[in-house]
Image (cartoon, grey):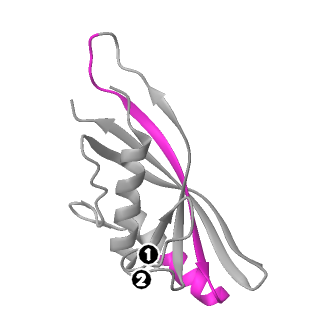
Amino acid sequence: MPVSGRVVSLAVQTMLAGATGRSCGYGAAPTSSSLPTGTATPYCVLYPIGSTSDGPPFGDASADARLVYQVTSVATTAEQAEWMADKVRSAFMARTEKGPTYLISATGYVVMSRELDKEEGVAVASGVYSYIQRFALEVTTLA
């Protein structure tokens, strides 16, 4: 069975909100009812960019995929945007001796590796500051 991008994306969104302590929207700004901080800045927005798959041989139920995400940290100052980007980077990349500090728990899948693909840095438009980062995940099915 192929990897479901939606299932992994929702797990990444949940991990980001928990690890940063700030709301994370999925393709759009978080709503006022989003946990834990609603639309209060800073927050981040998760955008699935795309994926590539390694199909299993015939008769094998397992599959692998490389999923790429953009995370845009949104704030009212450059310092807040960079602070939020630091928290996002830590959420994806921080490790202990036992593995990643923040787990991405996607039912039926396991994240095998994570990498920082690209950082664009701080930008400002109409008084809104943003910091763009891209991350790649290697995911496999638990069949």
Q: Are marks 1 and 2 in contact (CB under 8 Å)?
A: yes
Position of the N terminus, as image quadrant, is top left
Residue matched to label 1: 23
Above or below, 14 relative to 106: below
Tag 2's secondary structure? loop
State the residue in front, 94 or 18. 18
The residue located at (51%, 80%) in the rendering is 39
Which kind of residue does numbered mark 1 sit on? Ser
Using the image, determine if residue 66 lies above or below residue 8.
above
Q: Is residue 73 above or below residue 93?
A: below
Q: Which residue is mark 2?
A: 37
Query: Tag 2: Cα neighbours inside 10 Å, few (<14), some, or many (≥20)?
Result: some
Horizontal side, residue 9 vs residue 132: left or right: left
Q: To which quarter of the image does residue 110 belong?
A: top left
72 in the magenta segment: yes
Amino acid marked by disc 2: Thr
Q: How far apart in space, not on screen, are marks 1 and 2 (Cα)?
A: 5 Å
Q: Which residues are magenta?
A: 59-86
Image x and y of residue 123, in percent: 73, 75
Q: Position of residue 51 (x, y in %)?
A: 52, 38
Provide residue 25's location: percent of width, then percent of height. 49, 66
